[in-house]
Image (cartoon, grey):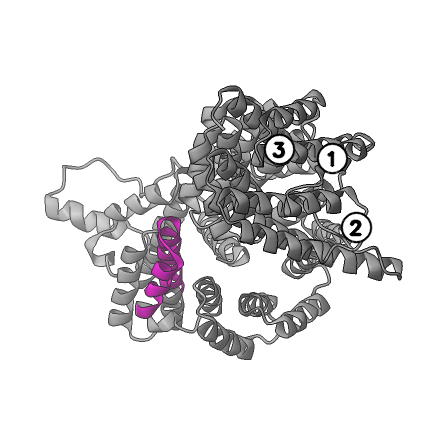
Amino acid sequence: MNVRIQSAMVAVLCAAVIFLAGGCATTKNQTVPVQNQEPREEPTTQENSEKKETQFSKDEFLASVRATAKTNGVEEALKRYDEVPANYADDFDIQFFKARMLDVAGRYSEAKSVCESLLAANGENKEVQELLRSIEKRFFMDNLRQVLSGGTAADALALYKDMPASIADDFDLQLIRGSLLVSENLLDEAEQVCNRLAQIDSESIDVLEIRLAIAERRDDKKARTAQLQALLKKDPYNAKANVAQAETFALGKRYKQARELYQKVLVKDPKNEEALFGVGQMDYFLEFDEHAKATFNKLLEVNPQNAQAYSYLGKLAYAQKRYKVAADNIAKALEIDPNNYDYNNDNGLYLRYLGKFDEAEQAWTKAIEIEPNYFLAYAYRAGLYDEQNKISQALADYKKVVALNPQYYYAYESIGILSLHQKNWTDARKAFFECRKYDMARAKYDNAVSSNKNKKPVPAYQGNISYPLLVTYCYYMEGDKKGAKDYSNSILRTMGDQNTIEYKMLRVFHDEAGEGTLPPKIAAISNINQRGKMYFYMGLFYDMFGGIEHAREYYVKVLDLKSPQFFEYRLAEWSMEINSNGNK
């Protein structure tokens, strides 16, 4: 709902109360004056009634009602109407004033009833008709607020079907309807509303803002640009236009330009929540951490219930490895918005670093319940299960990850590793095959980017040799020697330099021989991780072809490096456990 419209309606109500309270000449304790008379006998009941009606002054009554409204409020003032004599009960001025007070008190049905009675008794009266229209508008607005506070935009739109004819073309109410139609994605109807409103006020910035929202919902870049330009031409500091442009810059990672536009909004509206959040978020991306923290705290001063501010204060603390502070902030965000997927994901991450594994698992499980078709929470939870050696649970989650996001090839690697541990050679082979495919596709892209950037070709990437070696190994373990040789040969034919240790290792796997020349070459590798990987594959070669003692010798060499920066280290640990138990 348009905030300016709501504010305008509140202003109208406040002005009405002030009007009712203004110009009062009497005080709370004043009474209607009477003439001093000589003492006489008590009059009869009929005489009392006649005396009361004779003494009653309409002007003095209305002045007294105004005074009561000013000092004790409108509801108390309305009670004064019990004092009105019968012959004044239908007086136009008295009843018209009552209708206005009922309107201010929010008793719209009663106010409307009084106006209708006045029209029935006095015929068409522009003043009464205008008041009635104003009452019906406020009554409608009140119903809108109630519906939107506990219902949906669709529920609010349903109210428009039965709205009074007198306010059917009201500009403010139709403006709200246009916004509601956009929120329900009824874009054609929203556009029709905008067209009618533009005929009433061609300069309306509110109408342009709705048109901008329509263009964004349609993903119509041309129309969006046109509406942005029109808005900024009329109001260079327009909040919606500048925020929309800033978001475009942010998506393109042009964080400095986006920050400038958010700051522009704050010039006219220093408490604009979207702009404050945008500045803080851009500072976070630009790693201006202290500035970002200050901005998010300022945002919380404006709105202590802004969950996004707490979320990013958590991210800032996490980046500084202040995990307890991060967890405290995300907990506050979750108090405000408990069903936010990202907040639950972050909560799991911070709890994991605090060593609260059960709570972290619960957080990621909650995230999965919220968005069961998004992969990230499964990946986080899979990693937690993997870390705790809950192999079956980890495998199930990793498989869910690749089902939802086949491009997430890191999950294939984990599936391959865990499937090897379970001796599920076929699943492991398929997983490492996917790893090789995505590894080479990513490398091709990176090479193209590097070549364009450096204006010269870069050496062809040969790929991570671990994947072809493990695919070949799995074929052998499945008993498919032909598959092993055909696959390894297809890779060997694409590798240019035959003198590399990677080529020679895969050649040994293919030939099932020739390993004798490799140990001194491996020992000469300076990179400790690369050396450890090659020692592992020497062990795996002997493991395949029956040299258990030789296999153990090389697995020990891997473990002696005490540098588990490559996944083969874990496979070496498992292999040592298996061979030690005699369960090859």
Check residue 390 for magenta coloring.
Answer: no
> Which disc is residue 498 wearing?
2
394 displayed left or right of 241: left
Q: Residue at x 71, y 37 (%)?
A: 515
**Residue identifier under label 3:** 542
Q: In this view, does 275 lie above or below 301?
A: below
Numbered disc 1: secondary structure? helix
Q: Measure the C-alpha gap from mark 2 to mark 1.
A: 17 Å
Q: Measure the C-alpha gap from mark 1 to mark 3.
A: 11 Å
Highlighted magenta segment, given as a residue range: 134-161
User: Whole-percent x and y of residue 427?
Assistant: 48, 45
Q: Which residue is drawn at 54% across and 39% down?
A: 307
In the image, 457 versus 283, the foreground residue is: 457
**Residue identifier under label 1:** 516
Numbered disc 3: secondary structure? helix
Residue 511 seen in render: yes
Q: Which residue is drawn at 81% across and 56% down?
A: 450
Residue 277 seen in render: no
> Which disc is residue 440 wearing?
none
Callout in the foreground (2, 1): 1
Question: Which mark is first along the chain, 2 or 3?
Answer: 2
Pointer 2 local density, CA inside 10 Å: few below 14, some 14–19, many at least 20: few
- Which residue ends up furthest to the right in the rendered image? 455
425 displayed left or right of 522: left
User: Whole-percent x and y of residue 254?
Assistant: 75, 54
User: Whole-percent x and y of residue 232?
Assistant: 71, 66
Kind of residue at badge 1: Gly
Question: Which mark is first along the chain, 3 or 1?
Answer: 1
Numbered disc 2: secondary structure? loop
Callout in the foreground (3, 2): 3
